[in-house]
Image (cartoon, rainbow, N blue to C red):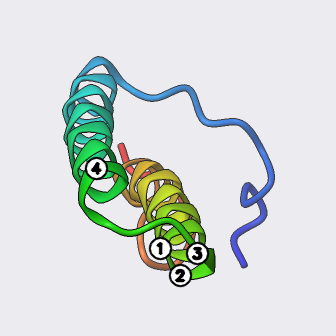
Amino acid sequence: MHPSTFDYLMPTEAQQNAMKILRHSAKVYCDMLEHHLPDGPDKDFIIRAHRANAMWANVAITRNPDGSPRT
């Protein structure tokens, strides 16, 4: 892991804009999942996994594959 793996990285303005777009898209998709999937443990799992993927998207925006900060 890169030494800065657990450090906070202030996203650049371009990264913040990309995060905003992806968060909105993730929310729209989550709304569709919520509406169309039947209630139950599978739905809970799918929505939680989707939430985790949305959070990892932010990491991908700010870090290179080796964990170093993306500038």
Of the two numbered discs 3 and 2 in the rendering, the one whose residue sits closer to the viewer: 2
Distance between the alpha carbons at the discs numbered 3 and 2: 5 Å
Residue type, label 4: His
Q: Which residue sits at x=72%, y=79%?
A: 1
Distance between the alpha carbons at the discs numbered 2 and 4: 14 Å
Q: Which residue is mark 4?
A: 35
Q: Which residue sits at x=45%, y=29%?
A: 11
Marking on residue 2? none
Q: Which residue is mark 1?
A: 46
Q: Secondary structure at mark 2?
A: helix
Q: Earlier in the sequence, mark 2 or mark 4?
A: 4
Q: Which residue is mark 2?
A: 42
Q: Which residue sits at x=53%, y=81%?
A: 42
Of the two numbered discs 2 and 1 in the rendering, the one whose residue sits closer to the viewer: 2
Distance between the alpha carbons at the discs numbered 4 and 3: 15 Å
Q: Quadrant of residue 22?
A: top left
Q: Which residue is mark 3?
A: 45
| Circles 2 and 4: CB atoms closer than 8 Å | no
Relative placement, left or right, of 50 versus 37 is: right
| Circles 2 and 1: CB atoms closer than 8 Å | yes
- Label 4 environment density (alpha carbons within 10 Å; few <14, some 14–19, many ≥20): few
Q: Quadrant of residue 27?
A: top left
Instruction: Give residue 8's position: percent from left, percent from top.
Output: 71, 36
| Circles 3 and 2: CB atoms closer than 8 Å | yes
Which is more toward the observer, 3 or 27?
27
| Circles 3 and 1: CB atoms closer than 8 Å | yes
- Label 1 environment density (alpha carbons within 10 Å; few <14, some 14–19, many ≥20): some
Residue type, label 3: Phe
Instruction: Give residue 63's position: percent from left, percent from top.
Output: 46, 58
